[in-house]
Amino acid sequence: MADPSFEGRQQLPRTPILTVPMEMLTLECLRCGDTRDVPASTNARVHAGECKRCEYVGWALVADLTEKLRRVLRERPPERRRLYAA
């Protein structure tokens, strides 16, 4: 039995599934200061996972951190490093 012929058939152009660029957020580890870019989420929470450098899981948006706040967080024990919305 011969394979079917696709001669004369037009191939459809391949288009990407996602045509809208996804916004990226830059997060900073609250323990060591390492940064990571993650896709923005449709809800308020973004799961960044563990920091590759120190394995901590506390993150904040780089734009939300000031040098004073970074210093305060570094001086605080990790179990007390939480940011609260004002």
Image (spheres, rainbow, N blue to C red):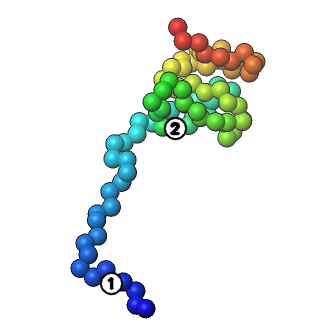
The quadrant of the picture occupied by the N terminus is bottom left
Secondary structure state at the residue bearing disc 2: strand
Is 31 on the left or on the right of 35, as rendered?
Answer: right
**Disc 2 designates what residue?**
37
From the top left corner, tell me how far across and down residue 30 is, in percent. Answer: 64, 25
Figure check: 9 above or below 49: below
From the top left corner, tell me how far across and down residue 66 is, in percent. Answer: 54, 17
Taking depth in this image into account, of 49 and 26 the one nearest to the observer is 49
Is 32 on the left or on the right of 41, as rendered?
Answer: right
Is 10 on the left or on the right of 37, as rendered?
Answer: left
Taking depth in this image into account, of 1 and 76 the one nearest to the observer is 1
Specify the amino acid type for callout 2.
Answer: Asp
Figure check: 4 above or below 53: below
Query: At 54% from the left edge and 20% from the top edge, which residue is drawn?
Result: 65
Q: Residues within 10 Å of mark 2 (few under 14, many from 20)?
A: few
Is 73 on the left or on the right of 42, as rendered?
Answer: right
Taking depth in this image into account, of 51 and 33 the one nearest to the observer is 51
Specify the amino acid type for callout 1.
Answer: Ser
Closer to the eye: label 2 or 1? 1
Q: Residues within 10 Å of mark 1 (few under 14, many from 20)?
A: few
Q: Quadrant of residue 81?
A: top right
Figure check: 17 above or below 33: below
Between the C-alphas of marks 2 and 1, the distance is 47 Å
**Disc 1 designates what residue?**
5
From the top left corner, tell me how far across and down residue 67 is, in percent. Answer: 56, 18
Query: At 37% from the left edge and 51% from the top edge, which residue is drawn?
Result: 17
Query: At 36% from the left edge and 83% from the top edge, which residue is drawn?
Result: 4
Secondary structure state at the residue bearing disc 1: loop
Q: Quadrant of residue 49?
A: top right
Which residue appears farthest toward the front when viewing the image? 1
Query: At 23% from the left edge and 79% from the top edge, which residue is drawn?
Result: 8
